[in-house]
Structure formats: structure tokens, C-alpha cells
């Protein structure tokens, strides 16, 4: 395995368009994270690898002595919300954001009311946030991460709003292994960002229109896999990838309800002109075609 150097690592981040930079201390930390070196190697050409790099660096967003924004004032945090305590358990309560007085707040025509379980995503990729001069970022450009946790005995899941590099609304699924009671190792999480083309198929399963969906060949090395199956009383999710522990979690009906809302909201963002009824009708047609073997 090639030993990472500070100069080459930061140069690769810059070439990939990632605004985060590492210190020697930060490089030592991320070098211990599974898949970082592999993701870094492919991040300039592979979108999923780039997202993986950003996701790993995001864990140190409150440690400017380890990871910092290029040209940002020293000590300035990279997000407006702090991470979860020790990055190994559930995220902190939602925090209020101040709105710039000089800009009117634009009302979205989609998903006007946020779910009650709105939280700051503890595993969110924030390197996409480009800060203007002075290091201050307009509130209108801040990404609001919303998600829902599902806890199992051996592992936990986090379904969250996400955005692809191409600007499409989607869902990211994070899985982490348990290290103690109600504590999960999010530093070593497995993350899969669902592509826009796969989003309807996964949503169709969540809405009970298909019995199961399996996504494969995700990630920089094409080893990430996601299986979601409707087992009647519960749903079941399985995630796996090379060099990761397999994550298997049952999902109760109440959790499915919350997750279903996340998928519907993201589908609406991609096609707001057809409305909720249009999205649901489209999902039914999509599921019917898949049942007939039409891809």
C-alpha cells in the first residue's frame, strides 16, 4: 500500500475540486479509516469515490487543527451545526439558523413543512460548500440535511437527504456497527448514495409496490451493495462492501413511514411540476414495468 503524503493528498483534494485540506495530524487520522486511500485514488474521476472522501473528512469538521477549509479563517467550523458527541451516537438536536437580513427568504414550493425529526446530518459531506471571501456562507446556499435513524442490536442506519454531484436530489444510506449500548462507530460507517436512476426503484419498495430491490457495483471499487426487502411485518436492509463488516438491520413500520417521507420529498424535488399525485402514479407505473422485466 502506498504511503500517503500531506502534499500529494492535499493536491489530489484540490484537483478533485474538494475545498478541504488536511494537516499532518488530520492525515494521520484519516489514513486509519478503511477505504480512504482507495477513495482518494479514484476521487478525481469517480463521483462515488469523491463523495466517500468528503464523507470521511466530514467527521473532523469541528477539528480545524486536523481538517480545514482552504483559505477559510483559522478555527472557523465548516458547518453551522456541530457533530454528534464523539461521532458514535445519534446527532444533536436541531439548531436554529440566522437568516441574512439583506436577502429575502424564498419559499420552496415543495416539502414546505420539515419532518419533526429534522436533524443536522452527523455524516454529511460538506466540502461541496464553497465559501466566499471572508469565509461566510450565505444561508441560501447552506444545505439542510434531514434524516432518520434506525437502530438495531448490532448496527444502525441513517437515511438522509443528499444531493449528487450533478445536483439531483437523492437519499444517502449510512450504516455503522455498534460498539456499546446505543453507541455506533460512525467514523467507520459504510455509506451508499443512491443514484437518481435507482431512486425510484428503492422508493417503489418503500411504498410496497415492489417486494425488494438490490443495488450493486456502487463505490470506487464497485463492491458496495444494498439490499432492501419487504418482509411483511418488517422491512429488512443489508449493506456490504469490501473491507467492511456486513450491516443487517430490520426496519419497523413506524421507521418505514419516516423513510418513505424522505424518499417522496426527494422525488418531488427532482420533478416538482407533476405534484405528489404524479410522483405516486409514476412510481406505480415504474414498479409495474420492473415486474414485467422492463429495465
Image: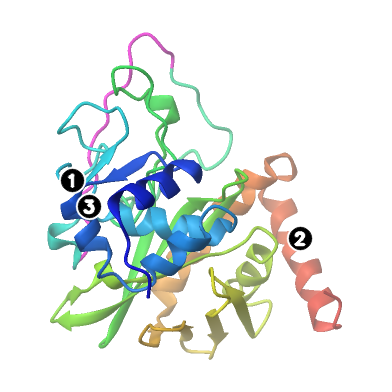
Quick check: 37 above or below 96? below
Residue 67 appears at what percent x and percent y? 24, 46
Q: Residue at x 38, y 22 (%)?
A: 138
- Does label 1 or label 2 sit earlier along the sequence? 1
Q: Which residue is mark 1?
A: 62
Q: Is residue 90 left or right of residue 213?
A: left
- In magenta, the rendered stretch is 89-104
Give the position of the N terminus as an image quadrant: bottom left
Q: CA distance from mark 1 to mark 2?
A: 44 Å
The 10 Å Cα crowd at callout 1, few under 14, some 14 to 19, many 20 or more, is: some
Q: Is residue 149 magenta?
A: no
Q: Which residue is mark 2?
A: 281
In which quarter of the view is residue 197 placed? bottom right
Residue 85 lies, in percent from the top left, at 13, 59
Q: Which residue is mark 3?
A: 60
**Left or right for 35, reference 294:** left
Would residue 261 be visible to someone looking at this image?
Answer: no
SS under mark 3: loop
Q: Secondary structure at mark 1?
A: loop
Give the mark, 3 or 2, whose residue is nearer the N terminus.
3
Amino acid at each position: 500500500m502506498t504511503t500517503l503524503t500531506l502534499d500529494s493528498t492535499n493536491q489530489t483534494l484540490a484537483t478533485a475540486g474538494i475545498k478541504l485540506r488536511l494537516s499532518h495530524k488530520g492525515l494521520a487520522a484519516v489514513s486509519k479509516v478503511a477505504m480512504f486511500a482507495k477513495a482518494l485514488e479514484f476521487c478525481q474521476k469517480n463521483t462515488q469515490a469523491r463523495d466517500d472522501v468528503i464523507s470521511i473528512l466530514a467527521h473532523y469538521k469541528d477539528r480545524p487543527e486536523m481538517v480545514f477549509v482552504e483559505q477559510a479563517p483559522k478555527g472557523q467550523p465548516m458547518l453551522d451545526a456541530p457533530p454528534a458527541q464523539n461521532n458514535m451516537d445519534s446527532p444533536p438536536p436541531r439548531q436554529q439558523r440566522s437568516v441574512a437580513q439583506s436577502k429575502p427568504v424564498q419559499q420552496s414550493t415543495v416539502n414546505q413543512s420539515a419532518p419533526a425529526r429534522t436533524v443536522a446530518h452527523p455524516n454529511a459531506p460538506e466540502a461541496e460548500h464553497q465559501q466566499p471571501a471572508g469565509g461566510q456562507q450565505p444561508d441560501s446556499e447552506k444545505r439542510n440535511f434531514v434524516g432518520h435513524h434506525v437502530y438495531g442490536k448490532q448496527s444502525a442506519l441513517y437515511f438522509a437527504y443528499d444531493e449528487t454531484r450533478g445536483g439531483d436530489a437523492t437519499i444517502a444510506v449510512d450504516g455503522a456497527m455498534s460498539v456499546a449500548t446505543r453507541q455506533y462507530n460512525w467514523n467507520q460507517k459504510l455509506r451508499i448514495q443512491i443514484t437518481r436512476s435507482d431512486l425510484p426503484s428503492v422508493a417503489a419498495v418503500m411504498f410496497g409496490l415492489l417486494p425488494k430491490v438490490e443495488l450493486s457495483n456502487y463505490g470506487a471499487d464497485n463492491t458496495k451493495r444494498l439490499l432492501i426487502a419487504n418482509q411483511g411485518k418488517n422491512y429488512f436492509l443489508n449493506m456490504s462492501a469490501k473491507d467492511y463488516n456486513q450491516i443487517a438491520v430490520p426496519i419497523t413500520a413506524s421507521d418505514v413511514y419516516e423513510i418513505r417521507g424522505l424518499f417522496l420529498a426527494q422525488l418531488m424535488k427532482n420533478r416538482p411540476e407533476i405534484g405528489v399525485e404524479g410522483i405516486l402514479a409514476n412510481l406505480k407505473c415504474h414498479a409495474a414495468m420492473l415486474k414485467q422485466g422492463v429495465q
